[in-house]
Image (cartoon, rainbow, N blue to C red):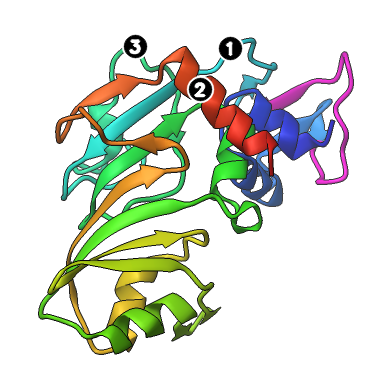
Amino acid sequence: MRLARYIAMSGYCSRRQASRHIDAGEVMFNGRIAEHIDHVQVGDLVQLAGQTLTLKAAFSYWLFNKPVGVDCNLRAHHSASLLHLLPLDAGRIYPVGRLDKDSHGLLLLTDDGELCQRLIHPDFYHPKTYHVQVERAFDETFLRAMAMGVQLREGLTRTCQIRRIAPDQFEIVLTQGLNRQIRKMAQMLGYKVIDLQRVALANLTLDGLALGAWRQLSASEVEALQLSLTRD
């Protein structure tokens, strides 16, 4: 098994984060600094931050309805960090992707690094749905431009689904997830986002989850989520 995948399946972090730890020389493999080409076999010793990593038998999955003002980083010294709000029985879980501090809504947290990788990597095209309000009413030209893709510094955004839900509000479904993508897209078209809520991720929604509340995914939700990922 490739080293980054092994670290992800240990529940320590996502595969993307595992690659960063390897790049930084923070992973030890059988007593030496690990390399990306290392493959883990039975009996190999993998250590990160002084911790010996082993494959998890079961994973944890939580939904959080994040309020504005909570930062998705997990830094103990940061007063606004999500770390201070984690349920006591959640264990070592981390967000699947980010939701800006000034945005709110659905956030999935897990220690399942493989699932995290498939949900956040743009190659898998998993949908994320947002409700967005801008500072003034917009016309159909704005909707068409957003749907067709907007040229940002990072490149042309991927085509997406979008529909009006009020004169100054729209629903947008992304399969990409660039940093602050919706805000940047709207800004390039002359609009300022004043409220942004994520309402769905793949088959998961906020239904019945109050602002600031947590809940674990049911077994059927986890099964449906995993099934949707294996179909891609």
Location of residue 89 with respect to 20 vertically, above or below: above
Q: Which residue is mark 2?
A: 222
Q: Main secondary structure of the magenta part?
A: loop
Whether residue 171 is in magenta: the answer is: no
Tell me: 195 left or right of 95: left
Q: Residues within 10 Å of mark 1 (few under 14, many from 20)?
A: few
Of marks 1 and 3, which one's residue comes earlier in the chain?
Answer: 1
Location of residue 96 with respect to 113 vertically, above or below: below
Q: Secondary structure at mark 3?
A: loop
Residue 180 coordinates in the image, percent (x, y) = 36, 66
Q: Which residue is mark 3?
A: 89
Amino acid type indicated by mark 1:
Ala
The structure residue drawn at horizontal position 79% and vertical position 39%, both measured from the top left corner, is 34
Instruction: Measure the alpha-carbon separation of dots 1 and 3.
Output: 14 Å
Of marks 1 and 2, which one's residue comes earlier in the chain?
Answer: 1
Q: Which residues are magenta?
A: 33-47
Q: Secondary structure at mark 1?
A: loop
Q: Nearer the viewer, residue 221 or 88?
A: 221
Location of residue 182 with respect to 217 vertically, above or below: below
Residue 22 coordinates in the image, percent (x, y) = 70, 45
Q: Nearer the viewer, residue 82 or 161?
A: 161
Residue 161 coordinates in the image, percent (x, y) = 43, 66
Q: Which residue is mark 1?
A: 58
Instruction: Measure the alpha-carbon separation of dots 3 and 2.
Output: 18 Å
Residue 49 in view (yes/no) = no
Tell me: 128 left or right of 71: right
On the image, which quarter does residue 41 sit in?
A: top right
Instruction: Measure the alpha-carbon separation of dots 1 and 2.
Output: 12 Å
Q: Could you tell me if the residues under marks 1 and 2 are in contact, i.e. CB atoms within 8 Å?
A: no
Amino acid type indicated by mark 3:
Asp
